[in-house]
Amino acid sequence: MANIIIIIIIVVVILAAAAYGFSMIMRRRTEGQIIALEERKEALFDLPVQDEFDKVKAMHLIGQSQKIYREWHQKWVDLSQNSFADLENEIFEAEQLNDSFRWSKAKVQADEAESQIEMMENDADRIRQGLNELMEQERHNSTKIQDALDLYDRLRTHIADTAEQYGSAIGMIEESLASIEAEFNQFVELNSKGDPVEAAEILGIAEDHTVALDNITQRIPEIIRLVDEEYEGKINELEAAHEDYIGKGYIFPSTFNLEQTLAQVRSKLKETKENLERFELDHAEALLEEVKKQIDGLYDIFTKEYRGRKYFERNSEKLMEYIDHTRENNRTLLLEIDKALQNYVLPNNEKGTVRTFQVRLDDLEKDATEILKIKAEAVKKEPYSMLNRQVTAIISALQEIESTQITINTKISNLASDEKKAKEDAIEIDTRLKMIKRFVEKQGLPGLPDDYLDNFMSVNSQVDKLYKELEKLHLNMEAIHHMISLAKERLENLKDSTDKLLDNAALAEQLMQYANRYKNMVNPNGSPVAPGISDSINRAWSLFERYDYIASFNSISAAIDAVEPGVTARTVKVYHEQKQNPEYRM
């Protein structure tokens, strides 16, 4: 019993010691947090915020700047008078709770004080940043005003030195200069009275207006040059050219109305000047782009008629010569066709085509005669651009005739060489066919399948037809070319069929010989190694004797692979590695 009491006392002592240790740890931890809060409070209280307010106040702010200053000052008063007192109370209460061993409440109170001081620190940072921006704004204004004034002075000097380049727009430019100068004066007044914020806004406006006017003055001279010099000069040039062209007998298209178009151009140039005086430069430049297109269009018409006259005079003289040349070629070509028809068939009625050219040439000669009559007239009734359509149509028709003549002549000229080549091809095909026949016979096969024989006879029949066609009195080379192409295609198919037939026959024999070794092989227990192999060999040999070499190969390969997997693949590989090209493929 005494031992139990002793144990209980020891446990109680241990628990009391643990509770005391825990309470001391909690107290010290909260105490450390409170000390840190005191230090942060002192650092916040020591900030030179009031000195910064005094510096800004000495700037004697007014207007918008003074309003901003007052807002920041009121926030600082609230912070320094009210928030500081609240913070001190919270820290003091946390200390009292911690000293009275009410640690959890002390911790909550300390956390609230920490949240409060973080908010106050953030507010102080924002207040100081706002004061700094007011001071920086004043310094920025002082620096920026000089740059802006330098830009303005350069612009004003440049405008004064080049006033003649701006034409009637100079009045509007001078008004803009006066307006910008008034804005600068307003800036100086606001800044000197202590409103740097509003002054900065006015300075920004003045600077923007200066840059905009600078851009405008750069664009105006080119617009005035285009209106007063370039386009006015081109108008005069076009009017003089029109008078000159009319005097030289030129006729313009019915859609061409120089007077009306130039009236539209002058109206747009006048509107451009009006837009210039209102600084509507985008509209002015858009109008000038329209003017450019209209003037370029007029120049294009003059150029087209000028070049059209040269083309007409140069090519109209050659029409008769070209027609005579084409007619002579037609006559010669007819003679060549008649000569060719003695030995060849021309299935495309080339002779009829060439005869129609004679009629067509007569019609073209009439058209050319009319062109020459027009050329001889002192005053033309149509523009040269229209007349040239007729000249071009005649030339195009002659070129088309000449191209067809060349095609027909080339075909006729090649008939003899085509015939020789066709006979050589026929002999080559026949030779290859005989080589295939000899090569197959040498293999000593028991026979050939019906489908292979049909394929062979089809090629042989095609060769016979080709020889008969080549023996005719009048050769149809187009038909012969078609027969040669068909014979070559069938010969290639026969070569492939022959390769497949002989390969399968040879491989079937090799595999049957290989399979024979398994006929009498037995396992140690006396059972056959490959039961049924004899039947498989007999079945494959039966197919072989019926000329079905593909089926024979498939049958024996399946049987032998069941006994010795992979033997067929090895046999086929070795066979093709050792196989030589048959003579019909050399």
Image: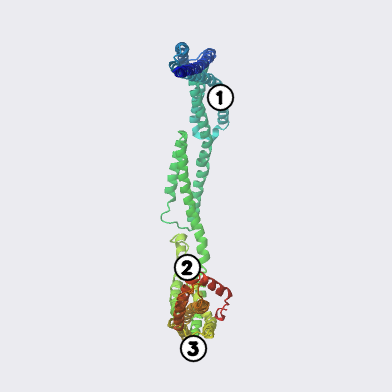
* Residue at 49 percent of width and 25 percent of height: 179
Q: Which SS class for mark 2?
A: helix
Residue 384 percent location from the top left of the image: 47, 60
The answer, for residue 64, to whether it is visible in the render is: no
Residue type (three-letter) at the residue carrying disc 3 = Glu
Residue 62 percent location from the top left of the image: 48, 15
* Residue at 52 percent of width and 27 percent of height: 207
Residue 545 percent location from the top left of the image: 46, 84
Please state, as top left, top right, bottom left or bottom right, where the C terminus lies in the image.
bottom right
Residue behind mark 1:
144
How far apart, in angstroms, are the residues tagged by discs 1 and 3?
Answer: 106 Å
Q: Which SS class for mark 1?
A: helix
Residue type (three-letter) at the residue carrying disc 2 = Ser
Residue behind mark 2:
396
Residue type (three-letter) at the residue carrying disc 1 = Lys
| Nearer-N-terminus badge (1/3) | 1
| Nearer-N-terminus badge (2/1) | 1
How far apart, in angstroms, are the residues tagged by discs 3 and 2?
Answer: 43 Å
Q: Nearer the viewer, residue 177 or 15?
A: 15
On screen, 192 above or below 151?
above
Furthest-front residue in this view: 1
On screen, 71 above or below 287?
above
Few, some or many C-alpha atoms within 10 Å of disc 1 (few <14, some 14-19, many ≥20)? some
* Residue at 52 percent of width and 29 percent of height: 210
Say which of marks 3 and 2 sits in front: 3
Residue behind mark 3:
471
The answer, for residue 445, to whether it is visible in the render is: yes
Q: Quadrant of residue 103?
A: top left
